[in-house]
Amino acid sequence: MKRRITFAVACFAFLTGAVQQSAAQSVQTIAAVVNDEIISNFDLDQRIRLVISSSGAEPSARLANQLKSQVLTGLINERLQIQEARRLNIDVTEDEITGAVGFIEEQNGMEKGNLARVLESQGASIVTLRDQLRAQISWSKVISRRLRPRVVVGKDEVDTLVTRLKKSGRVEHLTSEIFLSFRDQNAAVREDVIANARTLIGQLQDGASFPILAQQFSQSVSAADGGDLGWITSAELPDAAGAALETLTVNEVSSPISTRDGVYILLVKERRRFASVDPEQVTVALKQIFVPLKADADDDSIGSQMALARTVAGTVRGCDDFEALAQEMGSDESGDLGRIKVSDTPAQFRETILALDVGEASQPVRTDTGIHVFIVCERVQPEAPEPDRRAIENSIGQARLSMLARRYLRDLRRDAVVDIR
């Protein structure tokens, strides 16, 4: 069994068999020309093998054919990104690429220099990996130089979102995304991108890794982090994507979500209510009336004591009245239980206590030792945690940067001469 190699940016391994073609044949044919630079079918085949093996999918000629269009789009985008970096005199040194390779080896517990040998043993050259890393580092530098300085998130923007979230008590979703851009609004292009999204969803449903497919295919800035968006609200996504996010269950992958700029595939990993308090952390001033039961009590005895407890619960008027009745009952366990966190009470009582209004007596709760009636005389709600303003600012900025990067790449594609063979 081949060793799977996990990468910080992507997972790389290569296949033989179903998707392999003769290198001698592939290298002689052209898959696309991007501003006079050639992408060969050999390059395309290598990347398809990479994607299939790294994702954990079962290799087949059918799957390779399904992925071909999207993989080629990715290679075209990489050429455009490298060309733009070259135009801006942005260099990626061999030392930077070697450092990225070394980081991959470190992440996989491999000795330095061993990655090249592993790849070559599987029929691939380290050059293919280095080319992909060159494109990724180049584009990261382009974005940092040209776009990141333009992304300024004002304090008022953060204030507005924080206020809105506090008022609405919105839900936050720990979310990952794969975003496939419509390079133009041509209907055929849109349908092709949607079809590619369905193929990726099929692979995810068959057990493929979401982070790896995001790293390989997503055209969002989040791709470098495996599509991870962190904790977000639905308001931070385009309307259609935000609405879909609200309907997903935890660990559910969405259907293709079509927006103006492209298609989203979303995954919700966790969900929580924004700035909410765990109800079991509430502190209550609690009193109890306890009616003991003998271990050998018969049904008639139990029934009469339950009826007594219901009468007490139904007639008590406030905490003072409850306290007087507790004293009359004469049980050592009746009376004031003091201030206590709901989480510190026995589990079988928590739901009953949480449901009570202040001054309201509970219905009887039977346990092995007797019958309990509770009353909450005071409730102290802990302060809700303040929202993480830095996280909100980063989220707004990341969304804006991702949008600018997509537009930048779309403009490069529009102005380029791309000939797909």
Image (tube, helix red, strand yellow):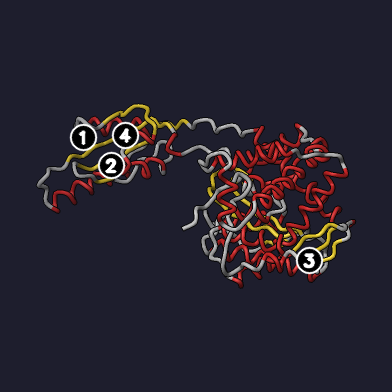
Q: Earlier in the sequence, mark 1 or mark 4?
A: 4
Structural distance between the alpha carbons of marks 3 and 1: 92 Å
Verify CB contact (< 8 Å) between mark 2 and mark 1. Answer: yes
Q: Which residue is mark 4?
A: 322
Q: Residue at x 19, y 46 (%)?
A: 305
In this view, the residue farthest toward the top is 338
Verify CB contact (< 8 Å) between mark 4 and mark 3. Answer: no
Residue 329 numbered tag: 1
Q: Which residue is mark 2?
A: 312
Image coords of residue 126 (percent x, y): 65, 49
Structural distance between the alpha carbons of marks 4 and 3: 87 Å
Image coords of residue 378 (percent x, y): 42, 31
Image coords of residue 103 (percent x, y): 60, 39
Disc 3 versus disc 1: nearer the observer = 3
Q: Is residue 157 left or right of residue 120?
A: right
Structural distance between the alpha carbons of marks 1 and 4: 11 Å
Image coords of residue 257 (percent x, y): 68, 61
Q: Earlier in the sequence, mark 4 or mark 3?
A: 3
- Report the amino acid beneath label 2: Val
Q: Residue at x 56, y 32 (%)?
A: 385
- Report the amino acid beneath label 3: Ile
Disc 4: CA contacts within 10 A as few (<14), some (14-19) or many (>=20): many
Does the image show residue 409? yes
Q: Which residue is mark 3?
A: 30
Q: Earlier in the sequence, mark 2 or mark 1?
A: 2
Disc 4 versus disc 3: nearer the observer = 3
